[in-house]
Image (cartoon, grey):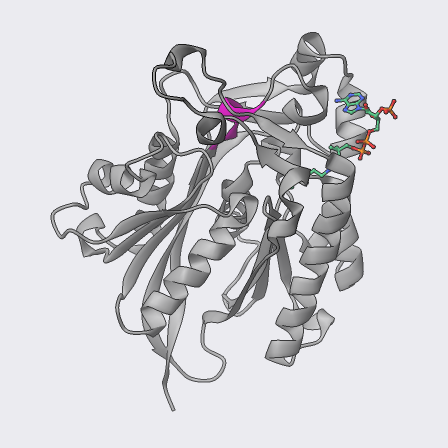
């Protein structure tokens, strides 16, 4: 019997041109190329050009995904952008993406999702519910960031970690038998008690009092207790993976590809070890992208789809973790 399901019809991504290497960072803060590589696995990251915004990267990734899916912008009935670095406080980056894509004629709803590095997993989860409820049949989901704009470039413990980019997926409604391609399950979680381990201060929370000059108000930047975040990231993503396996009645060896959030190679290796998958089954981009927050999972997914590693029928497990804390997973039969 055919059942409704949600298919990933196409993926896309976009990286800014400028590469920032560890050697360049070693000229900017008290660090070394080796320290960064050994502790994080990062060799370089991309940085958006002046005047290049999150919506620009998002649009380019979205266009590639739409082309791969064979879907026209005006056929979309929902646009979701997961981002922590929107172009503006408002309007939502998703509405700018809608206009720049030329998808505005049909007036499909468009909104942003703020779950930091878990944003793409959150957005896919929301899109899946819209499609399964019958409200939508073609949804563009984008994770896009210009994190370089909220990094303290004088703090060596954080500025070495982050990069800019965007990844996208077009999700479509389908009907399928047991064993058909589609999303098998989605799982999202949050625990707001960890606010102070990873956050951006400033901005609105230290904003203006009536009469104050906006030009001297502080711009927010990332503050993190890296060591503690590290432990929670491994614990939470491992728990999400366990929940996913249990809910789907699967064993660890049933997973063909792990596409984890790309924050630190040591975090990725710990999760792979717990899942008992070899690193040859893990998609790794952190060496070239750094941590691109909401863009990291879709950037990695798109790379492995385009180079042919992920094949039809493979079980692909996306897992992510971010500030909040927020975390989650998506299991897809490709
Ligand atoms: N270069 C050289 N030394 C540095 C450094 C740098 N860029 N950054 C920090 N250090 C120093 C620290 O000051 C500390 O020195 P001390 O021992 O004299 O106090 C030492 O290195 C160890 O710091 P620590 O924070 O314990 O290192 P670590 O092995 O935990 O690595 C991170 C730091 C940030 C790479 C790591 O904790 C991490 O990746 N955390 C998770 C990050 C993450 O995932 N964030 C986003 C989640 S979505």
The residue closer to the viewer here, 58 or 306, is 58
Please provide percent x and percent y for residue 289: 58, 33
Left or right position of 155 against 55: right
Q: Which residues are magenta?
A: 146-151
The residue sitting at the left extreme is 105
Q: Is residue 147 magenta?
A: yes
Marker count (numbered) = 0
Ligand 1 rendered quadrant: top right
Please provide percent x and percent y for residue 214: 38, 15
Q: Residue at x 33, y 68 (%)?
A: 131
Give the main secondary structure, helix, strand or loop, of the magenta stretch.
Answer: helix
The residue sitting at the bottom extreme is 1
Left or right position of 297 against 32: left
Please provide percent x and percent y for residue 155: 68, 19
The part of the image, by quadrant, that contains residue 83 is: top left
Q: Residue at x 28, y 61 (%)?
A: 138
- Which quadrant would the N terminus be assigned to in this image? bottom left
Q: Indicate whether 183 appears above or below 103.
A: below
Left or right position of 52 against 226: left
Q: Is residue 83 magenta?
A: no
Left or right position of 103 against 225: left
């Amino acid at each position: 019997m055919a059942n409704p399901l949600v298919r990933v019809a196409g993926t896309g991504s976009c990286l800014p041109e400028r590469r920032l290497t560890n050697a360049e960072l070693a000229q900017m803060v008290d660090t070394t190329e080796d320290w960064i590589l050994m502790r994080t696995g990062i060799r370089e990251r991309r940085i958006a050009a002046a005047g290049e915004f999150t919506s620009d990267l998002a649009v380019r990734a979205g266009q590639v995904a739409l082309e791969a899916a064979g879907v026209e912008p005006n056929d979309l009935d929902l646009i979701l952008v997961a981002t922590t670095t929107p172009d503006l406080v408002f309007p939502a980056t998703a509405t700018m993406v809608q206009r720049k894509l030329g998808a505005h004629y049909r007036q499909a709803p468009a909104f942003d999702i703020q779950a930091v590095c878990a944003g793409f997993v959150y957005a896919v989860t929301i899109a899946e519910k819209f499609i399964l409820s019958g409200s939508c049949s073609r949804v563009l989901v984008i994770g896009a960031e210009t994190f370089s704009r909220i990094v303290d470039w004088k703090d060596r413990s954080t500025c070495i970690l982050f990069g800019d980019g965007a990844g996208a997926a077009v999700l479509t409604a389908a009907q399928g038998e047991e064993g058909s391609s589609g999303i098998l399950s989605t799982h999202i979680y949050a625990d707001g008690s960890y606010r102070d381990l990873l956050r951006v201060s400033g901005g609105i929370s230290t904003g203006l009092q009536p009469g104050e000059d906006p030009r001297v108000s502080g711009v927010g930047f990332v503050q993190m207790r890296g060591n503690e975040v590290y432990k929670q990231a491994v614990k939470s993503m491992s728990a999400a993976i366990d929940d996913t396996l249990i809910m789907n009645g699967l064993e660890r060896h049933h997973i063909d590809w792990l596409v984890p959030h790309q924050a630190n190679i040591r975090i990725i290796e710990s999760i792979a070890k717990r899942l008992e998958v070899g690193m040859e089954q893990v998609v790794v981009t952190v060496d070239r992208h750094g941590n691109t927050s909401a863009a990291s999972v879709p950037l990695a997914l798109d790379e492995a789809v385009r180079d042919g590693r992920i094949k039809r029928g493979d079980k692909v497990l996306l897992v992510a973790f971010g500030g909040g804390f927020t975390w989650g997973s998506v299991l897809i039969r490709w």
